[in-house]
Every structure is written in structure tokens, then in C-alpha cells.
Image (cartoon, helix red, strand yellow):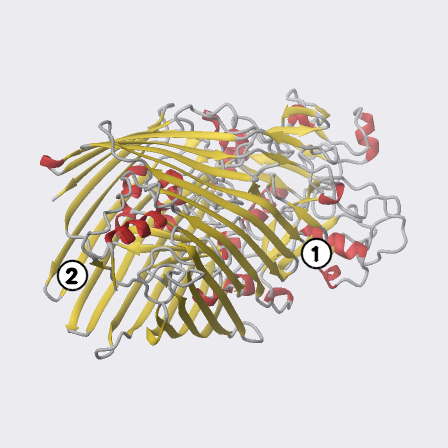
């Protein structure tokens, strides 16, 4: 179709309204041309959120775009580093700052804070196997489209929070070499990288190839004041705490023995360092594990890609999009903790080194220590990712219809192994024979034996995706504002997963293995397939000249039949675009969404876990609650908040049949771009997502609480206690925490953005932009209680500050350009005064709330294009003011006394990049 150039400028202006502020393009929007300009023809294209081809840049779906220039000027090494700064990201997404619980170098995206499992990642519209966006070579990508609304009707399972679609650099011509380097103002965390890209086009096709390399060095928690010690808040006091698994020992003993040493009946003894013992004090004697952890995990990535097309005939084209990535990474945590009860080791009462004359272990008293002589526990990951799409596409005669048939193959292989462990069968024999003195970690013979008997657990996991898809789209009939269009398609996908575990890590029926229970794992094998059919109908009902303006309607539907669930699933959506006046678009989307269980959800074998837990049977009366409190003596005091033993698994392990998550997604908004202020655009969207039957591991606390409140609860069978008559009678042996369907989720909020490309001045072109998200509600029904997370942080769910925003001031003059970007994270709370929430910022006092103010990070970038030399230089400073993260205390977080998924932990960071084009 032909339109005036001012319509083209207007469309571009509208598109810019959705750009994330901190990643906003530095060039200004072209001003509208005079009405007499010659018409131009716009090609139809498919944008994320639509399956049909359209000329409209802005549609009913809110889509943010990050272009190639923004990727180049951000200074970020990986796409994950770049995208996790978007205001629409919340929760607890993984990134290389996550050490304990991470370490494989991955970065994931959690749109709307719904979890990375509810954000679909695509490359050129094709599903990928590995959702680690760091594995995608950045030099392969032209731009990124972020759809911020549920889209299961268009893309299938997982597209609940939205879709992130990486659009390939298919039309690149020539060559490009780039190198970058950066480090913190403290001189650590150095990173370096480089890339090579080459593209060539000829009469019947084109090819683009590239290589990508980057390396990131680690940063130790000991190198920052906020993370050097494990800081705890308990009973209203802040202290340097840590773990009771300390090299000086932690010994629970008979009440008489403890009393003779001046300790309470619920206390314990530890070494006094002079050959004797004293009462254990958590504030004075706990082991500071924090100083041996990492703030930033190291990684090294090498990737390559091939993009190509070949015109077989004038109406048929073959194409290939393929990339490979290989990542080496690791985490490091404190030396191996030892717990005789949990690890299944018995120290006999008559052991020659046992000074207490009582038995320790599974049938005895508690003995805890730490094997410092083994050094840090380090986990290493070797990850390879391949994603290949080959296909044919073309037109159908002289009609508007086009078709595409492709095969999509994804292969992910991860090998991981760990140092710092010991074979427990050999340790038991060494204790029995007197080779190891478990009561003295400094004993030379003990140190020598431990170091010579290190046991290295290994695991390898492989996932494979094979997908065949055929689709077509084109015009059906003419309507007042243009032709109605239809897109249809069918798809078949099979996914399989297999993992192997070394014999020393295989978990046994006693929930232990040959090494520490924390490293126990299970092999896994499983697969499923899905058959899908989908359609989308776009109807331009009214044109702009009608009495009520332009009106477009879009209907979408997708039917999915998964072999892993008992029935098929249908997802539909309805979208409206209305322009009452030319400058204003009102849009809305109502959609059904769903997520099918993954292979891991279904088939994962048992692995050990140690979650925080408060036993509901403390103070048990001795009657009632028989299933929850089996073996618990009347008046049992328990141990309050502590870690318990849990066994995580997939649903099949406990005989549970999973079903899909299902829900609804709504988005209503407007985009205003007044012609009387060229370059100005404002967008406002209200959104809401509701989900039922959440697929998630049930927590140990929820299992115990549900059983305690309902003696006939199906979860009572997951509780296993030590039997009456044993030394540990009443204590939890372990609780099974499988993946089940439990709970609901309800979240809603507002997106607000504005951008203004000022008219050109003698001082250059200026761009102003802001993009923000307000989270009004985020409620999770766990099946036990309803947790209200909006405006709060919790280690189980992540950070859900009410407000997040980015702002930008951009400037360009001749060969120079610069940008000042600001990332703002609004105020939030840790803990809740509502006791039903079971969230307190204090480890010992219920209902304690800590208030944290908003955080603002400033980044500065300056670039210069040396056109004659085909060279561009970029220099930048991230976190210009060296803002340190909030102290949130280790009893509330998992890593470094703070929320490492949200706040910057490195401080001021300098970077540079040089790019040569030929």
C-alpha cells in the first residue's frame, strides 16, 4: 500500500513509544514531512504479537524494541545483562551474580515477575531449547522485540508473562570486528571479549557468519564490605552470624551433660580452642561461610553462527539459521559442612576420640563440623548449546499468500562436577578405625586423610528438541479498511531429556549418598510430544475516515495436545485496535494462557534440600493431628525456625499426575503521538494476569501446615518423622516436596512511558525518554496461605518493588554521541506485619518489617565514529555514583546479604569498546 511519508514518520514515532528508556536509540525520530511529499511503499512484515503480515509498526500488542545500535552502545557483554534491566522484569531471575544456586553462567528473563518458566524465548519466531539468553551470540542479533502480554494463542505454552523474540541480523553486508574490555573501580571483575561478523549478498541469496567470545573474571564476597560477613538480624539485634556447622564443632548432648557445662537443655557445646568445651553461641561461634563465596561468578563463552538463504526459484527460498555456544563457568562456596545425622555417619559412644561417651549420628545425638582442609566447594559447568532451523518458504502463485515449512532442532548438553567432597563410606570406616578424629579438624592425620580421599561427583544432562512446523498467511476478502488476513499453521514437537549421575552422588533409599547429602542426585529420563494447530484472523473493520475512526479486530486460537497430560488445551485471544483520531490509538487484548509441565516437572528424580522450617507440631498436645505429628511426644518443644531435610522430586516419583497451568491475561492501553508535537509519544497500558493450578514444588512448610490443618490431607504421606523411642523422636527425618499443581497467582499493574525527540539544534539532537512499570498486585495462593508480594522482597519469590523505571537523555552531534541513563528501583519492604504471611525480617521475632528506600543507578556512555577509518569507539561508566546494594541480612536472602538478582553488587564499572567495519 502507498502512504505519505508523514504517515511513515508517524508510525516510526509510535514504535519508539514502546522502547525501554535506558536502551532507547540515540538518533531522533524524523519530523513529519510536508503533505506534498511523494508517497512511499511500505513492505508488509510480521512483528512479535501478530502472525499476519502488516504495514503497521504499532499493533494491539505492547511490544518494546531494543535495536542494534542500543545493543552496541550499552557496553554489555551479553544479551542477558542488557535485557534484565528492563522495568518489566521482576522476581528472582538468574544471572551471573547468583553464586549459591547459580554458577552455570546463565541469565534468564522473568517478564512481569512470573518466572522465567512463564516467559517464552524465540529466535526469529522459533522456540529455542535453552532459555539462557547469554548463550545467544550478541553479534547475531539485529534487534529484540519484547511482547509484554500473554500470547499462548499465538505461540503456545509458556507465553504467559510475554515473549522475547530475538530478530536475526540476516541482511548484514560487509565485515565487522569488535573488541571490548571493562573492570570495576576496585580493579576486579575484569571482562574482555571480541566478535567477528561477515555478510555477503549475491543475486540468489546471502550468508552471514560470525564468531563471538567473552570472558568474565570473578569477584569475591570478601572484597566488599557489605558481603564480607554473614550478617543476621535476630531478636532485634544485628550480628555477624553464620553456620552452626563450624570446624570447632557443634555437639548436642544429654541435658545433664549440658547443665554440667553451664548450658541450657536446648543448647550445645563447641570447642573453646584450649582443649576444652564451652556453650555454643550463634553470635560468637557461628562459622562465617560468607567470605568464601562469590559476588560474580566467572564464565568464558565461545559462540558461532551461520545465517543464510538461497532462492531456489523466483517463488521459493531455502534458509538456515544456526548457532552454537560453549560456556565454561563455576561457583564457589565455603568448605564442606558435616552433619552426622543428615549425612548418615555414626560415631560410636566408645570411639577412642569421643570425649562425651554418647553416640552421634542418625540414631544418636547431633554432631556438626566443617571440613576446612578440603578447601572451598567449587562447582564447574561445561555447557554446549546448539539451535538450528532449516526451512523452505515462498509465495503461492500471484496471490498474497506465503508459506513456510521448517525443522527446528535444539540440543543442550551440560556437564557439571564439584570439588571439595569426601566419600562418606570411606569416612565411616576411617572414623571406626581411628584414622580420622572427627572431633579435631586440625589433627594432622585427619587433614591428610581428608585431602587424599576427595570424591568428585559428576552429572551430565542432555535435552533435545525436534520440531516440525508448517504455516501460511495471506489475504481473504476486502473490508472497508483493507483486506482481511488469515494465518494458519500446524506443529509437531518432541522434547526429551536424559541425565546420568556418578555412582558417588546417587541418592539411596535413606536419602543419602556416598558423599554429602547436598550433592546427592538422581538420573533422569523422559520425553513428551505435542501436536498443535493454530489460526489468526485480522480484520481491518473501519478506516480512519469513518465517523468513529479506524478499527481493527484480531482473533487467535491455538489447540495443543500434549502426550504428558490427560486432555488437550485450547487457548484463544481477542485484540482490538481503535483510532478515534489519527493521533491516538486505544488498544486491548484479552487472552487465555497456559503452561504445560516440563520434562523436569514430571520426571525429576529425588534430590536433597535443606529449607527453612517451623514445625507446626511444636507444643503438641498429644492428641489429634495424628498424621502430621506421628511420633511427636506431648509438650514437644522442637527447635523453632531451623533447616529441615527435604527431598525434592518431579511429580511421577510420588505418583502425582500434573495438569497444565491455565489462566487469563488482559492488557488495555493507549498510545498518543500528537502531530502538533513531532517526535513526542506517550503510552499507557493496564495489565492483569490470573493463573490457576500453578506447577511448582510444594514447600516443606506447606506440606506440614496443610496436613496439620487437615488430618486427611493427601500431603500427609509426604511427612517422615523419627519414630517414638528414638533419640530424635518427633523430629523430622525428611519431608517430600514434589512438583504438584497447587495455588493460584493474581498480578496486575500499569506500564507508563514517554519519549520526545527534540527538534534539531546547533548543539545537536537530543532525545528524552522514560519507561516505567507500577506493580499494583502480586498475590500468590500457596494452598496454605495467600502471600502478598507487591512492594516486598522474599527469598522464595524475589523482588517485587511497586515501581521500576528507566530514564534517558540522549545526544548526537556529528560523529559524537552520548547517553545518560538512569535505572530506578522503587522502595520495598522485607517482612510483613500480617502474621498469616509467615514473613518476618527478624529471624526470631514474628511480624518484623524493614523498609528500604528507592535505588537509582546512573550509567554514562560516550561514542565517536571515525568515518574515514571505519572505526567507532565507545567509552562508558556503569553505576557512576558507585551505589552499594541494600543490607538485607542473610536470614532474608540466599547470597551476599542482599538481593543479587535485582541490585548491582560490583559498584562503579568502567568499560570500552572498539568496532571496525570493512
Return the x and y of residue 415 as percentages of the image width and height: 40, 53
Q: Percent position (x, y) of residue 890?
A: 60, 33
Q: Quadrant of the N terminus?
A: bottom left
Front residue (pair 495, 275):
495
Say above or below: 17 vs 811: below
Q: Is residue 560 visible?
A: yes
Q: Residue 12 location in percent, x, y?
A: 31, 50
- Give the total of numbered labels: 2
523 relative to 445, above or below? below
Mark 1: few, some, or many residues within 10 Å (few <14, many ≥20)?
some
Q: Are marks 1 and 2 in contact (CB under 8 Å)?
A: no
Q: In the structure shown, which secondary structural element does the residue marked by tag 2 occupy?
A: strand
> Would you place residue 784 above or below residue 613 in this image?
below
Q: Residue at x 60, y 45 (%)?
A: 776
Residue 93 spot, x, y in % from top left: 49, 46
Please identify the quarter of the rendering in which residue 771 is found: top left
Quarter holding the C terminus? top left
Label 2 Cα crowd, 10 Å radius (few <14 / some 14-19 / many 20+): some
Which of pointers 1 and 2 indicates the residue nearer the eye? 2
Q: Is residue 62 left or right of residue 395?
A: right
Q: Residue furthest front?
A: 547
Label 1 and label 2: CA atoms lie apart by 55 Å
Give the residue pinned by disc 2.
Answer: 206
Q: What residue is pinned by disc 1?
A: 783
Quadrant in the rendering for residue 898: top right
**Foreground: 862 or 722?**
862
Amino acid at each position: 500500500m502507498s502512504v505519505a511519508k508523514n504517515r511513515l514518520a508517524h508510525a516510526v514515532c509510535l514504535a519508539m513509544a514502546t522502547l525501554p528508556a535506558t536502551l532507547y536509540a540515540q538518533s531522533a525520530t524524523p519530523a513529519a514531512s510536508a503533505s506534498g511529499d511523494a508517497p512511499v511503499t511500505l513492505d508488509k512484515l510480521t512483528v512479535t504479537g501478530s502472525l499476519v503480515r502488516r504495514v503497521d509498526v504499532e499493533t494491539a500488542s505492547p511490544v518494546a524494541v531494543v535495536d542494534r545500535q542500543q545493543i552496541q552502545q550499552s557496553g554489555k557483554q551479553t544479551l542477558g545483562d542488557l535485557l534484565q534491566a528492563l522495568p518489566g522484569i521482576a522476581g528472582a531471575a538468574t544471572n551471573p551474580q547468583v553464586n549459591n544456586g547459580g554458577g552455570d553462567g546463565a541469565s534468564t528473563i522473568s517478564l512481569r515477575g512470573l518466572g522465567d518458566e512463564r516467559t517464552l524465548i524465540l529466535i526469529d519466531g522459533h522456540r529455542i531449547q535453552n532459555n539462557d539468553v547469554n548463550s545467544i551470540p550478541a553479534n547475531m542479533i539485529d534487534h529484540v522485540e519484547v511482547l509484554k502480554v500473554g500470547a499462548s494463542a499465538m505461540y503456545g505454552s509458556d507465553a504467559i508473562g510475554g515473549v522475547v523474540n530475538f530478530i536475526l541480523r540476516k541482511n548484514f553486508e560487509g565485515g565487522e570486528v569488535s573488541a571490548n574490555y571493562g573492570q570495576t573501580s576496585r580493579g576486579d571483575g575484569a571482562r574482555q571479549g571480541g566478535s567477528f561478523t561477515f555478510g555477503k549478498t549475491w543475486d540468489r541469496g546471502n550468508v552471514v557468519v560470525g564468531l563471538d567470545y567473552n570472558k568474565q573474571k570473578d569477584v569475591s564476597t570478601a572484597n566488599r564490605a557489605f558481603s564480607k560477613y554473614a550478617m543476621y538480624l535476630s531478636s532485634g539485634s544485628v550480628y555477624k552470624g553464620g553456620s552452626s556447622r563450624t570446624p570447632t564443632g557443634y555437639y548436642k548432648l544429654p541435658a545433664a551433660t549440658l547443665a554440667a557445662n553451664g548450658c541450657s537443655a536446648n543448647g550445645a557445646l563447641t570447642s573453646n580452642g584450649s582443649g576444652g568445651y564451652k556453650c555454643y553461641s550463634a553470635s560468637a561461634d557461628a562459622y562465617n561461610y560468607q567470605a568464601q563465596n562469590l559476588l560474580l561468578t566467572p564464565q568464558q563463552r565461545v559462540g558461532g553462527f551461520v545465517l543464510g538463504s538461497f532462492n531456489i526459484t523466483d517463488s521459493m527460498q531455502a534458509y538456515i539459521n544456526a548457532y552454537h555456544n560453549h560456556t565454561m563457568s563455576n561457583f564457589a562456596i565455603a568448605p564442606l559442612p558435616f552433619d552426622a545425622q543428615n549425612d548418615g555417619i555414626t560415631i560410636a559412644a566408645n570411639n577412642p576420640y569421643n570425649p562425651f561417651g554418647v553416640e552421634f549420628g542418625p540414631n544418636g545425638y547431633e554432631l556438626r563440623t566443617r571440613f576446612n582442609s578440603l578447601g572451598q566447594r567449587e562447582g564447574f559447568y561445561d555447557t554446549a548449546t546448539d539451535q538450528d532451523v532449516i526451512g523452505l518458504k515462498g509465495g503461492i502463485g500471484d496471490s498474497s499468500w506465503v508459506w513456510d515449512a521448517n525443522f527446528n532442532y535444539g540440543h543442550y548438553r551440560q556437564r557439571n562436577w564439584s570439588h571439595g567432597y569426601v566419600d562418606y563410606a570411606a569416612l565411616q570406616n576411617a572414623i571406626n578405625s581411628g584414622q580420622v578424629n572427627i572431633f579435631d579438624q586440625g589433627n594432622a592425620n585427619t587433614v591428610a586423610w581428608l585431602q587424599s580421599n576427595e570424591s568428585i561427583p559428576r552429572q551430565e544432562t542432555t535435552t533435545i528438541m525436534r520440531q516440525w512446523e508448517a504455516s501460511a498467511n495471506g489475504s481473504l476478502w476486502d473490508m472497508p479498511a483493507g483486506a482481511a488476513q488469515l494465518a494458519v499453521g500446524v506443529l509437531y514437537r518432541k522434547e526429551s531429556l536424559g541425565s546420568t549421575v556418578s555412582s558417588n552422588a546417587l541418592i539411596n533409599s535413606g536419602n543419602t549418598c556416598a558423599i554429602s547429602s547436598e550433592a546427592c542426585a538422581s538420573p533422569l529420563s523422559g520425553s513428551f510430544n505435542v501436536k498443535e494447530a493454530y489460526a489468526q484472523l485480522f480484520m481491518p473493520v473501519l478506516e480512519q475516515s469513518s465517523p468513529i475512526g479506524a478499527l481493527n479486530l484480531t482473533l487467535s486460537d491455538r489447540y495443543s495436545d500434549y502426550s504428558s497430560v490427560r486432555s488437550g488445551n485450547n487457548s484463544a485471544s481477542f485484540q482490538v485496535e481503535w483510532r478515534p483520531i489519527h493521533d491516538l490509538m486505544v488498544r486491548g487484548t484479552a487472552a487465555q494462557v497456559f503452561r504445560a509441565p516440563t520434562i523436569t516437572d514430571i520426571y525429576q528424580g529425588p534430590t536433597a534440600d535443606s529449607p527453612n522450617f517451623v514445625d507446626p507440631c511444636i507444643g503438641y498436645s498429644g492428641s489429634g493431628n495424628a498424621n502430621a505429628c506421628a511420633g511427636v511426644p506431648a509438650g514437644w518443644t522442637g527447635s523453632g525456625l531451623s533447616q529441615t531435610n527435604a527431598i525434592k522430586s518431579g511429580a511421577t516419583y510420588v505418583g502425582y499426575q500434573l495438569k497444565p497451568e491455565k489462566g487469563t491475561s488482559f492488557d488495555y492501553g493507549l498510545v498518543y503521538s500528537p502531530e502538533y508535537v513531532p517526535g513526542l509519544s506517550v503510552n499507557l497500558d493496564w495489565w492483569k494476569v490470573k493463573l490457576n493450578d500453578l506447577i511448582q514444588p510444594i514447600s516443606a512448610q506447606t506440606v506440614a501446615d496443610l496436613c496439620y490443618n487437615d488430618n486427611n490431607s493427601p500431603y500427609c504421606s509426604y511427612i517422615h518423622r523419627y519414630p517414638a523411642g528414638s533419640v530424635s523422636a518427633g523430629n523430622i527425618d525428611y519431608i517430600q516436596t514434589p512438583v504438584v499443581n497447587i495455588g493460584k497467582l493474581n498480578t496486575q499493574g500499569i506500564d507508563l512511558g514517554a519519549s520526545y525527540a527534540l527538534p534539531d539544534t546547533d548543539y545537536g539532537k537530543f532525545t528524552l525518554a522514560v519507561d516505567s512499570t507500577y506493580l499494583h498486585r502480586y498475590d500468590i495462593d500457596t494452598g496454605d496461605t495467600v502471600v502478598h508480594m507487591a512492594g516486598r522482597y522474599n527469598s522464595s519469590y524475589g523482588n517485587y518493588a511497586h515501581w521500576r523505571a528507566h530514564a534517558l537523555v540522549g545526544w548526537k552531534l556529528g560523529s559524537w554521541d552520548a547517553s545518560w541513563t538512569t535505572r530506578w528501583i522503587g522502595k520495598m519492604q522485607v517482612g510483613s506485619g500480617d502474621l498469616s504471611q509467615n514473613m518476618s525480617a527478624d529471624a526470631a521475632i514474628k511480624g518484623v518489617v524493614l523498609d528500604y528506600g528507592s535505588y537509582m543507578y546512573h550509567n554514562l556512555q560516550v561514542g565517536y565514529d571515525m568515518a574515514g577509518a571505519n572505526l567507532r569507539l565507545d567509552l562508558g561508566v556503569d553505576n557512576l555514583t558507585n551505589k552499594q546494594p541494600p543490607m538485607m541480612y542473610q536470614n532474608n536472602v540466599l547470597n551476599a546479604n542482599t538481593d543479587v538478582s535485582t541490585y548491582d553488587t560490583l559498584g562503579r564499572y568502567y568499560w570500552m569498546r572498539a568496532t571496525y567495519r570493512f
